[in-house]
Structure formats: structure tokens, C-alpha cells
């Protein structure tokens, strides 16, 4: 079975548009973060994971992009592992179930109520598509996804790429 991983805007934007700022991670500069992000995408590709892009996240990505939307859409279309997933009838039903069952974090979130529901839409798509992992740097969405049993990764959680072995023996100091 193909592993399905959902990426939200906080992962997609810096990967697809290098001019997009990345949320700071203590002890790691922006270049280091981009290297980890690129390595993570490469690992997903090597593992043949399907990267799901919920349409609400795509809309947000295209709104935040610092360049015209069409080149970003073209880049997504060229990525074999990417699949844009609509907020359809099944997702709408799941979203309503999540919200009715006390999912709404609007009271405890710093976000406006509409944005919390936007997060619910992204999570509903992940659930109906059978995703096991959500990649986000959104703290509220992370909390909601973990409550639904998904594994969640933020940029700070990504491991560094493995270091290549040196082709020669390095003498020990001393």
C-alpha cells in the first residue's frame, strides 16, 4: 500500500517558492531548513509516498506565493508524487463530523474561527484519503491532527540529510 502524506502550506510554500520565508527553527538557519526540507521531499519520493495537497492548502499557497500562480501549478503538475485532492462531498461530510464532535479550536486558538475551519477542511481531506502523516508547521493543525491519530512533522522535526562518508581515513588528532 502506498504511504500517503499530506503537506500543508507551511511545507509546500518554501519548497515550491524559494522566496517564501520559512518559520524560524532554533539553532538552524534558513539554508539548513531548506536542505532538510528538500531531503525530506527526496525521501518521500524514494519511498514512493504519495504527497497529497488538499485544495484548501493549495488555495492558501497560491495566495501567499510571491510570484504568479501558474508557474507554481506547473511545478506541482511536474512532480510525479504530488496529487491535488479536492474538498469534495466525502471531505465535507467528515469536516462537518469533526466540527460537530467538538473539533473546533476557535476558542483556544489565536486564529479567527474561519481559519480554524480551514484547518478542519485540510484534516478532513487527510482522513478521507487515508493519510497517516501530516506535515505542517501550524501548531493548531498539528494539535487537531494528533487528536485524529495522524503522525505530524514540522520543519523542526525533520532530520538532517545523512553525511557522505569521506573516501579516505582521517587521522585522529594527537
Image: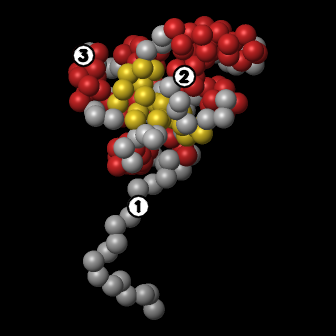
Residue at image mark 1: 162
Contact (Cβ within 8 Å) of mark 2 with mark 3: no
Residue at image mark 2: 128
Residue 10's x, y, as percent?
A: 47, 29
Which image quarter is the N terminus in?
Answer: top left
Spatial CA distance of label 2 from label 3 is: 28 Å
- Ranked by sequence position, the earlier of labels 3 and 1 is 3
Residue at image mark 3: 70
Left or right, 141 with respect to 173, comes to: right
Residue visible at 67% across and 29% down in the picture: 148
Among all residues in the image, which is located at the extreme front? 1
Whether residue 60 appears in this view of the structure is: no
Residue 60's x, y, as percent?
A: 44, 16
Q: Dot 1: what SS?
A: loop
Spatial CA distance of label 1 from label 2 is: 34 Å
How many numbered circles are shown? 3
Would you identify the image quadrant in which residue 96 lies? top right
Among all residues in the image, which is located at the extreme bottom? 174
- Ranked by sequence position, the earlier of labels 1 and 2 is 2
Residue visible at 45% across and 54% down in the picture: 160
Q: Residues within 10 Å of mark 2 (few under 14, many from 20)?
A: some
Amino acid at each position: 500500500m502506498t504511504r500517503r502524506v499530506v503537506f500543508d502550506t507551511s511545507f509546500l510554500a518554501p519548497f515550491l517558492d524559494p522566496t517564501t520565508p520559512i518559520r524560524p527553527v532554533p539553532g538552524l538557519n534558513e539554508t539548513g531548513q531548506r536542505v532538510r526540507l528538500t531531503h525530506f521531499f527526496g525521501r518521500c519520493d524514494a519511498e514512493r509516498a504519495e504527497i497529497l495537497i488538499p485544495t484548501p492548502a493549495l488555495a492558501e499557497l497560491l495566495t501567499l506565493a510571491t510570484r504568479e500562480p501558474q508557474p507554481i501549478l506547473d511545478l506541482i503538475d511536474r512532480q510525479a508524487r504530488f496529487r491535488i485532492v479536492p474538498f469534495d462531498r466525502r471531505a465535507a461530510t467528515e469536516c462537518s463530523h469533526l466540527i460537530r464532535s467538538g473539533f473546533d479550536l476557535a476558542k483556544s486558538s489565536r486564529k479567527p474561527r474561519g481559519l480554524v475551519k480551514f484547518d478542519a477542511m485540510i484534516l478532513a481531506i487527510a482522513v478521507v484519503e487515508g493519510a497517516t502523516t501530516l506535515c505542517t508547521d501550524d501548531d493548531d493543525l498539528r494539535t487537531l491532527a494528533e487528536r485524529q491519530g495522524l503522525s505530524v512533522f514540522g520543519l523542526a522535526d525533520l532530520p538532517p540529510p545523512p553525511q557522505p562518508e569521506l573516501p579516505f581515513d582521517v587521522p585522529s588528532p594527537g
